């Protein structure tokens, strides 16, 4: 099969760090264009807008949309209307309803839509899922604490309404948890902490449960300096499972059982090629739905102003 | 066909005002029991909990759940696990995910789940939908302004996290708008006003659009004294459509074209009997999804404390 002629839209840090190397190493793809208000990619045609790019380069078969979520719907719609398959960076949109609309549009046109969740492809995630499927889980704790100044320096969009704040990393945890646990979760309580000068939360404490009353607690915090934590801890009948470093390492009762180099974006692009070839979509809204539920159900607390 | 043996759970104002008269007049039902922490229904067996009721009265075939949304999932699950069909008052739950879970559970057991939206059955709603289907819509304004002290005196649960605040009536507007407009909507911006002493908003301004960029604006306010407004106004190529009084009256260019007495709850119970007989569910989460999206995307503003 000929490589999929792909274009990138929204050229920023995540594209340079992850998308470009993943596409370059995958023979399923040929990168032929890019569109971005500010960024460019060397060695291919660059455009200021997706509309200009699609007009000028009709050979494009698929687009990967990496701009902030608040602008993703419009671009996705333009791409689907032009008959292109669409890869959405996470989160797939600013609202659940707009992604549902895109999913229906893609289906009506026989195109593939991929709502990507890169953390689900972290190295030890499948091993954690397999382990949990064989035992009885007593409770689960999710601890996702990082330093926003280090990871998102001066990224204003993450603090704007629709930018999700702490849920921007937190949704990575939710994408793993919803994948590895045996039953669907739902939020039962939440406290969201908003800096008094920002429209998005800097921290959140959430409790979930499932149809069998499994207690699941998540602590998300963007004010963590020093040691960073991206851990999911499950107490089970077969011992304590710790999935740490964002899904990279798995330990059972303190014994390391799974560790390998991360390949998240290469695996995302492998998956996208797979669904394009199969003529289907892959859109799981559960992680974003939990975030929306937490906002709807949660108590709001105002905390100290945040300045970059 | 023998009448459906039904039980009511959560006996409060809405049950006495609407559910009891609707069930009494419908020969598809026989009301045989009720469960409530505080209320009772004369002439039938009453219980303190749904569990006690289902244990004592195995003949129950369906339950109608009318307690506050924060407590609805648990009761619905108990009922579905006991093999009963379930009618959910609006909103169907405190989170989207819990309702999705119930929907899957009902499907797995071959039971009917009904997420009821009573305002969709207001007298002029179908006429409004038919009118809008024949013309081009320029824009839509939703004005839902009422006096919370009059309509919800001392109902603490509506102010608690998960009680939805102004969205408790506002979701009625959204249930109509999502039904009468030709394409799915999604929220593009929202401002939610929270009284400084409450966990739920007292007012909200929301803008929506759809795949064809239709401008839709909604103003929800619980501080309206004097004239109450439950209006949906659409400017169209065929004139200005006003669906007023919560869906009871329809006017085109000032001319009243549809008005009849409201029959919302009788029609809901007719619909529920229909899906039970057909062995299917009716769960449209779009109104609740828009509320969750507005909370997720919206800016929060703190306003004057609210005291009943």
Image: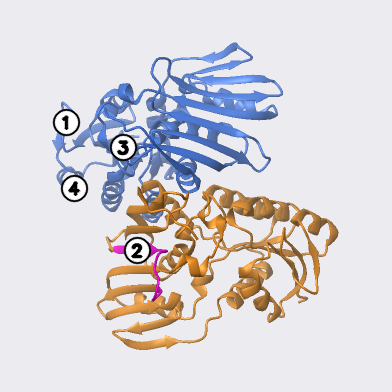
Chain colours: A blue, B orange
Reply yes or no: does residue B228 show up in magenta.
yes
Instruction: Classify mark 4: helix, strand or loop.
Output: helix
Residue at the image point whose x is 67% and y is 39% from the top: A213
Dot 2 crowding, Cα within 10 Å, few <14, some 14–19, many 20+: many
Magenta part of the chain: B216-229
Q: Look at the image and tell me whether residue A284 can be seen.
A: no
Q: Where is residue B15 in the image (x, y as percent from the top left)?
A: 65, 70
Query: Depth-wise, is mark 4 or mark 2 nearer the camera?
Result: 2
Marks 1/4: CA–CA distance = 16 Å
Magenta stretch: residue A164 in it? Answer: no
* Residue at mark 2: chain: B
Task: Return the residue nearer the eye: A147 or A258.
Answer: A147
Callout 4–callout 2 Cβ contact below 8 Å: no
Q: Distance between the residues labelled 2 and 3?
A: 25 Å
Mark 1 vs mark 3: same chain? Answer: yes
Which residue is denoted by mark 2 in the rendering?
A: B218
Residue that appears at 28% across and 84% down = B253
Disc 1 target residue: A40
The lab-note entry on whether marks 4 and 3 share a chain reads: yes
Tell me: residue B122, above or below residue A254: below
Q: Residue A51 carries which label?
A: 4
Mark 4 vs mark 3, foreground winner is: 3
Disc 2 vs disc 3: Cβ atoms closer than 8 Å?
Answer: no
Give the residue number, with chain letter if any, for mark 3: A159
Q: Residues within 10 Å of mark 4 (few under 14, many from 20)?
A: some
Point out residue A160 in the picture as x, y percentages from the top left corner.
29, 41
Chain at numbered mark 4: A
């Amino acid at each position: 099969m000929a490589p999929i002629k792909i274009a990138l839209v929204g050229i920023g840090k995540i594209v340079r760090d992850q998308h470009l190397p993943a596409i370059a190493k995958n023979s399923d793809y040929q990168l032929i264009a890019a569109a971005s208000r500010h960024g460019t990619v060397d060695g291919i045609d660059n455009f200021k807008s997706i509309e200009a790019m699609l007009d000028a380069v009709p050979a494009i078969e698929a687009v990967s949309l990496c701009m902030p979520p608040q602008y993703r719907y419009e671009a996705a719609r333009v791409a689907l209307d032009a008959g292109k398959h669409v890869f959405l960076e996470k989160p797939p949109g600013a609202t659940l309803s707009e992604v549902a609309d895109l999913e229906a549009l893609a289906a009506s046109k026989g195109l593939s839509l991929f709502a990507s969740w890169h953390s689900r492809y972290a190295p030890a995630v499948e091993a954690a899922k397999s382990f949990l499927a064989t035992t009885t889980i007593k409770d689960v704790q999710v601890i996702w604490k990082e330093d926003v100044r280090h990871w998102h320096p001066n990224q204003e969009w993450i603090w704007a309404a629709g930018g999700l704040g702490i849920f921007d990393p937190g949704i990575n945890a939710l994408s793993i948890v919803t994948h590895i646990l045996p039953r669907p979760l739902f939020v039962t309580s939440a406290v969201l902490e908003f800096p008094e000068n920002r429209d998005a939360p800097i921290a959140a404490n959430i409790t979930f449960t499932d149809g069998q009353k499994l207690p699941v607690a998540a602590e998300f915090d963007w004010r963590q300096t020093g040691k960073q934590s991206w851990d999911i801890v499950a107490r089970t009948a077969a011992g304590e499972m710790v999935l740490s470093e964002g899904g990279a390492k798995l330990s059972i009762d303190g014994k390391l059982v799974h560790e390998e180099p991360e390949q998240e974006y290469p695996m995302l692009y492998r998956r996208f090629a797979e669904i394009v070839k199969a003529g289907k979509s892959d859109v799981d809204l559960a992680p974003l739905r939990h975030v929306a539920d937490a906002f709807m159900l949660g108590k709001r607390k105002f905390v100290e102003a945040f300045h970059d």
